[in-house]
Amino acid sequence: MSHYTWDYEEIIRAAGHRVTPQRVLILDAVCDSGGHTTLGDIYARVREVDRTIDRSTLYRTLKLFVELGLVVSADTGDGETYYEIAKSHRHHHLVCRQCRAEQEIAHTLLEGMCDHIYRAHGFRVETDHLVLFGICQQCQQDQETL
Amino acid sequence: MSHYTWDYEEIIRAAGHRVTPQRVLILDAVCDSGGHTTLGDIYARVREVDRTIDRSTLYRTLKLFVELGLVVSADTGDGETYYEIAKSHRHHHLVCRQCRAEQEIAHTLLEGMCDHIYRAHGFRVETDHLVLFGICQQCQQDQETL
DNA sequence: GTTTATGCAAAGGTTTTGCAAGTGG
DNA sequence: CCACTTGCAAAACCTTTGCATAAAC
């Protein structure tokens, strides 16, 4: 899951923007974090490499990356925005309220719902990165055995 | 859509909290606003009755009401938290990315998806107030006619 | 060289918190 | 009465913005 597989520099330049060390560093950080991360986490990562990088740069850069489609953002509904490297397949996340574990799920599982909503309300759901909260299998089993 | 139908005072007291004029006023305001409202809106409403009520009281009270299940909160991703009186039926919201219009949808539309997820991953989705982003019917039509 | 991006600092906004005074049960 | 609540003020956040400097192209 590396951004090295696509020519991100070309994408940035094609949109009339410049490839700076900071931008490369930030894209690296989002990549290295694996799943989805918060801005605070990305900040900590880039800070380990470059002590002078500023939060405002991070905000501006992430906003740009989302616009360019290099990064997808997800609003969890709990106040924090999550960021993740754009992948080829649309997917979403399940986050367990108890153990905080997260897993990825295919977009296929949501397609039925999107259809239902479109048929009922004419509304085209475009959430490309949904985060659903609930209780994971493991925590359910742990509760039953109590 | 009135809170007078349930014994909210009993719920508050049962949890070891007190029924103050401010709390009653705030619950009234959330109710009167009909659908979902922002804290600023609630603040304006309660201020019309009581000029001395403070924002911090409002924050504390709404937080309490959410804990008690009297009010549900949702983060629409635009920086403000929305509040709404808890209703008997679970429901969710659609937010248009273009015109920012919001509409309510029945939980029924999500049940199929929840089942799919449970069957595929054993994960029990418990999001009781989901906010889905996309493009509403009106904005789709406006785009087509351009 | 131009134009864009950065870092800094400061501002704007929402939400939280410490504390003395007030009030519900 | 006593513990919980309130209002006030201040602080803690998160995010954005203006501007001079620095860097990319």
Image (cartoon, coloured by chain):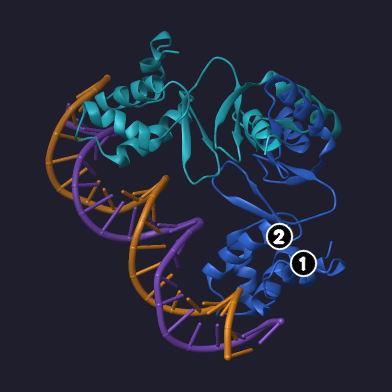
Chain colours: A blue, B cyan, C orange, D purple
Mark drawn on residue A68: 2
Q: Are marks 2 and 1 in contact (CB under 8 Å)?
A: yes
Whole-percent x, y for residue B81 in the image: 47, 39
Residue at (49%, 46%) from the top-left corner? Answer: B79
Q: On the image, which quarter does residue B133 sit in?
A: top right
Residue B122 is at least partly visible in this image: no
Chain hosting mark 1: A
Q: Quadrant of the C terminus of chain A?
A: top right
In the depicted structure, whether residue A48 falls above or below residue A68: below
Q: Amino acid at mark 2?
A: Leu
Q: Residues within 10 Å of mark 2 (few under 14, many from 20)?
A: some
In this view of the protein, which residue sits in the foreground, B142 or A63?
Answer: B142
Whole-Å distance between the Cαs marked 2 and 1? 7 Å
Local packing at callout 1 (Cα closer than 10 Å; few below 14, some 14-19, many 20+) is some
User: Which x, y percent locates residue A17?
Assistant: 67, 71
Residue A76 horizontal side relative to residue B69, left or right: right
Q: At 43% from the left edge and 11% from the top edge, which residue is drawn?
A: B6
Q: Secondary structure at mark 2?
A: helix
The N terminus of chain A, quarter of image? bottom right
Q: Residue drawn 65% across and 70% down?
A: A45
Q: In the displayed image of the protein, which residue is found farthest to the top?
A: B5
> Which residue is under mark 1?
A11
- Residue B57: which disc? none
Q: Is residue C12 shown above or below B30?
A: below
Q: Residue furthest front?
A: B146
Q: Amino acid at mark 1?
A: Ile
Query: Who comes first in sequence, dot 2 or dot 1?
Result: 1
Secondary structure, mark 1, is: helix
Residue B131: image quadrant is top right
